[in-house]
Amino acid sequence: MLDGAECRRLLGTASVGRIAFTEGAMPTIQPASYALRGDDVVIPTGLGSKMAAGSRGAVLAFEVDEYDLVERTGWSVTVIGPSRLVIDPGQVAALDALGVHPWLPTTTHGYIALHMTVVSGRRITSP
Amino acid sequence: MLDGAECRRLLGTASVGRIAFTEGAMPTIQPASYALRGDDVVIPTGLGSKMAAGSRGAVLAFEVDEYDLVERTGWSVTVIGPSRLVIDPGQVAALDALGVHPWLPTTTHGYIALHMTVVSGRRITSP
């Protein structure tokens, strides 16, 4: 298991993760680009997207990893916490300055802000 | 959106994805190595793992993707369906023949078999 500081550091080294949310009472996962801002993971998403609909206020899981298929080594960090949807134009513009593009191209976007409440991670060393 | 045949083909081109399950009433995500066997995604996991505990019989989501950070192109396929935990030694031995190692090294393992009930995917082309 990795400590919180190492998890946070690793989260800062990547730019695409995966988010789990609920769609029609079913779990689903999608890739998501992201940035860190304070204690939030911020994820751009289309305003009419299923991700935006599924994440509004819900407790979400977000995961980032790296894996070397040949060496069978890598790491994974998972963040769990309450989310909010940022749609206020001023706040969206402020987050746009982070330079993160939505994974799915979209004409109008907001952000999911996931508060990093529970952060855990592990490193896989060669067997 | 990708059709079912293309989703299935893409699932066959990778060997690590991410699985969403519930742990203590909270959603979580972990990387998972996998193989396809008939209409199941089979995922080796430690018998005492949180993944095994969280997936027993539940409807799960499993996702595989590829993304080119420079070109901003890629694809993602998500599988949703009911799962079962395979622990019978004969069945485990049969699945071991697929040659898939658990993402997290473990001394004793079984398999999560996720029946591919809903399969969806999309391709991201350059903006």
Image (spheres, coloured by chain):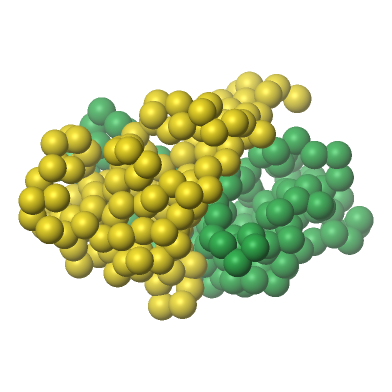
Chain colours: A green, B yellow
Q: Nearer the viewer, residue B8 or A115?
A: B8
Residue at the limit of the structure toward the right, as seen here: A89
**x, y percentage for residue B71?**
63, 21
Q: Is residue B36 above or below residue A79?
A: above
Indicate the quadrant containing the N terminus of chain A: top left, top right, bottom left or bottom right: bottom left
**x, y percentage for residue B48?**
20, 67
**In the visual, does A54 lie left or right of A121?**
right
Q: Is residue A33 above or below residue B122?
A: below
Q: Nearer the viewer, residue B97 or A2?
A: B97
Q: Is residue B8 visible?
A: yes
Q: Nearer the viewer, residue B46 or B93?
A: B93
* Residue A84 sits in quarter: bottom right
Q: Is residue B32 above or below residue A61?
A: above
* Residue A101 sits in quarter: top right
Q: Is residue A125 above or below residue A91?
A: above
Q: Residue at x 16, y 55 (%)?
A: B109
**In the visual, does A96 lie left or right of B15?**
right
* Residue B11 sits in quarter: top left
Q: Is residue A3 visible?
A: no
**x, y percentage for residue A20?**
55, 57
Q: Residue at x 45, y 62 (%)?
A: B59
Q: Residue at x 70, y 38 (%)?
A: A104
Indicate the quadrant containing the C terminus of chain A: top left, top right, bottom left or bottom right: top left
**x, y percentage for residue B115?**
39, 50
Q: Residue at x 78, y 48 (%)?
A: A46
Residue at the limit of the structure toward the bottom, as seen here: B24
